[in-house]
Amino acid sequence: MRHRIAVIGGGPAGLTFARVLHRHGHPVTILERDPAPDARPPGGVLDLHERMGQLALGKAGLLAEFQALSRPEGQAMRILDVDGTVLRDWRPRPGDRANPEIDRGQLRDLLLGPLDVQWGRGVTEVVPRTGDGVLVRFADGRQETFDLVVGADGAWSRVRPAVSSATPHYTGITLVETSLDDVDTRHPDLARLIGDGSMAVYGVNRGLVAQRNSGGHVKVYAQFRAPLDWHTSLDRHMGLNRRAGMNAGMNAGMDTGLDTGLDLADAEAMRSSLLALFDGWAAPVLDLLRHGTAFVHRPLYVLPVSHTWAHVAGVTLLGDAAHLMPPLGVGANLAMLEGAELAESVAAAPGPADLDEAVRAFEEQMWARAGGWAKITMAGLERLVSPDPTEALALFDEVQPS
Ligand SMILES: Cc1cc2nc3c(=O)[nH]c(=O)nc-3n(C[C@H](O)[C@H](O)[C@H](O)COP(=O)(O)OP(=O)(O)OC[C@H]3O[C@@H](n4cnc5c(N)ncnc54)[C@H](O)[C@@H]3O)c2cc1C
């Protein structure tokens, strides 16, 4: 018996789910809000762990292709102090394929393969238990019905309200992302500083992380503790004056009377505010901000740790929609593993009662595993962006002993 299955969202969770079902010969409707695969920049690199993301790719029959595309050398990690002194310089051993890096765009294309995604189909609402199954409403006014609707639509899921009233809350930590292109030819000193993988500098309540993507592209994340509306009044919220960024000799925190707020879309204003925030850090480290192009504001939100819900027949969640957690290298891995596991369970369920039982069992397993990771990543975030920067180093030594 063929169940009518829809997955909402074509991110790592949704595409892995669909690809594994496809491998099992089971049809699935993939509904994605973006109008096209390349409608927006895909984001930074992901390191896929052997027992999570890579396991999922194995279930999709894509491990060999992943190994050909991914960059094991990208596992390298260097930690500097704010004066630019290298504190740790970890490199993978030859043949170490525990967590190789892959660009998100490459991963998306790998998963897409033969899948037939319906692009430009934003879902607005999912209504369980209607007469003929689960009703999906779309932004264009259309609606369709399925036996199982899988919400893989990320942090701000429109499927989640069908099973849970939980909403993400702000962690108190914000990222601002910028990037550099052709770093090896245009910024060779920075290329050497970053190395083959990632480089991180941790100061009091703030950090700067640079991650190498393929093709000489580098993503830089400035991370800092701040109220959600920090940008509306820099003097008041951050003790910052933006002249400090323009004039390194001036003391940050001096009242300038310029506290008019920051236009997040103004790249130069963002740059000078960040330079003021990181004032006093080594010049080569600050070059990551000086040479950054566009700046993207990403306040970090999370769902409650151990988010669960009373099972609702015909609807479930995967990935960030189910357990949004801090970005400490686990979210996409979990999302993919869950996608693969749910697909295998669904493919093995012959009748409607088996399908419901398979989803129920999957949810129990997902909640137990994701709850553990949510605790670990929340505690990790607190230590990485901490009043005591030695906490970040201690965390690195625990996770990556030399
Ligand atoms: C800065 C940063 C760095 C990170 N680094 C890592 C890392 O190194 N390793 C790691 O494992 N994780 C990392 N993560 C976490 C990772 O990005 C997420 O956990 C992962 O993308 C979750 O996948 P997903 O498929 O659940 O959701 P998403 O990737 O958010 O995909 C959701 C999809 O649903 C679509 N969608 C949304 N709403 C609708 C709608 N209403 N209708 C239809 N479609 C919709 C979206 O367009 C999107 O394509 C990082 C996160 C951040 C912010």
Image (cartoon, rainbow, N blue to C red):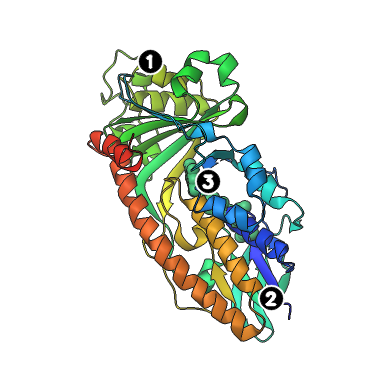
Sequence order check, earlier mark of 1 and 3: 3
Sequence order check, earlier mark of 2 and 3: 3
In this image, 114 relative to 327: left or right? right
* Ligand 1 closer than 8 Å to label 3 CB: yes
Instruction: Bin the neighbour count of mark 2 within 10 Å (Cα to Cα): few under 14, some 14-19, many 20 and up.
Output: some
Q: Residue at x 44, y 73 (%)?
A: 309
Element under label 2?
strand
Q: Nearer the viewer, residue 65 or 187?
A: 65
Q: Residue at x 61, y 53 (%)?
A: 57
**In the picture, residue 350 is in which quadrant?**
bottom right
The tag on residue 146 is 2
Instruction: Bin the neighbour count of mark 1 within 10 Å (Cα to Cα): few under 14, some 14-19, many 20 and up.
Output: few
- Name the residue carrying label 1: 283
Q: Nearer the viewer, residue 337 or 82?
A: 337
Element under label 3?
loop
In this image, 226 relative to 334: left or right? left
- Mark 1 vs mark 3: in front: 3
In this image, 341 relative to 221: left or right? right
Inspect the image, locate mark 3, and give the three-letter code of the amino acid beneath it. Leu
Judge whether 327 appears above or below 94 on screen: below
